Image (cartoon, helix red, strand yellow):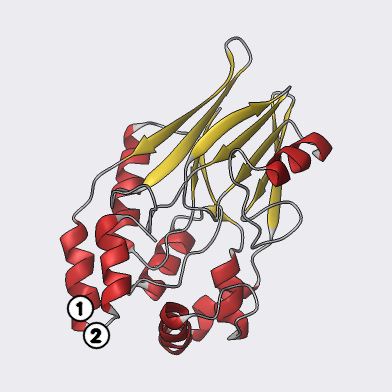
Amino acid sequence: MKIAVISDIHGNLYALMKVLEDIEDNKVDTIVCLGDLVGYGPHPNEVVAMIRRRKILCIKGNYDAAVCENEFNFIRENTINSFTLPWTVEELRAENRHYLDNLPTSLNLNFDGNNILFVHGSPNKINEYMLKDSEETETIMKELNYDILVSAHTHLPCAKQFDNKLFINDGSVGKPKIGRPNPTYAILNIDKDSGTSVKIHEVEYEVKRIIKDMKMLNFPERLISSFETGTE
């Protein structure tokens, strides 16, 4: 069983299209999306429509929740979000908001005896950062009643073993923080004979296209720069 995990698309249609092409090349069995389809980027409706059209299993991210409620409840109230939250709320079609609002906040799947929990932030909070080497992550993994935990939200891809439990973060499709604009995603391979393995995939896309779109819509320069450089 090969599972591709994507997340944090953040209204970046061009990055999503390229990642889905790469996933098709890798011949996976299923795709799971860990949320944050919208926010920051200029294509919220197009991204939601593509996820819906392809019937991709999806959970809700913290930015999705903030947009649905039009509140700074799960996101920071800063200059960038003060622009992108109201912009996305205004831009997002009612049917797409309804879709996001009704997404679950977690997903539990079992393959070949491997019990997997998929979340956006952490099992405790939709907007909690699980960093690879933090004490908080170690505590969560010790208390985890699953074999594998797959999360997102940090935009930093990683995989780490905690005793007999595996922790995975797939990174970000639309707004990476790896110091490059390249999208990342994860492929989790579960095989009865060879065991469980995970690989982080990094792909390139035409970042100039989204920069052009953002400039045409008068998005803040600092936000545009973050897409261009792959930094905060």
Residue 30 appears anywhere in the view: yes
Cα separation, mark 1 vs mark 2, equals: 5 Å
Quadrant (top left/top right/bottom left/bottom right) for the N terminus: top right
Residue at position x 23%, y 66% in the image: 210
Quadrant (top left/top right/bottom left/bottom right) for the C terminus: bottom left
Tag on residue 215? 1
Residue at position x 52%, y 40% in the image: 30
Does residue 174 appear left or right of residue 136 in this picture?
left
- For residue 85, above or below residue 202: below
Point out residue 220 in the picture as x, y percentages from the top left corner: 30, 80
Mark 1 is on which residue type?
Lys
Mark 2 is on which residue type?
Asn
Residue at position x 29%, y 81% in the image: 219
Tag on residue 218? 2
The local secondary structure at tag 1 comes to helix
The local secondary structure at tag 2 comes to loop
Q: How many numbered markers are drawn?
A: 2
Write down the quadrant of residue 47 in the picture.
Answer: bottom left
Write down the quadrant of residue 144 in the picture.
Answer: top right
- For residue 194, above or below residue 19: above
- For residue 28, above or below residue 45: above
Tag on residue 2? none
Residue at position x 66%, y 71% in the image: 102
Point out residue 161 in the picture as x, y percentages from the top left corner: 64, 26
- Foreground of the two, 85 or 107: 85
Query: Mark 1 and 2 residues: CB-CB less than 8 Å, in contact?
Result: yes
Does residue 184 appear left or right of residue 89 in this picture?
left
Residue 145 appears anywhere in the view: no
Outermost residue toward the top in this view? 193
Write down the quadrant of residue 140 in the picture.
Answer: top right
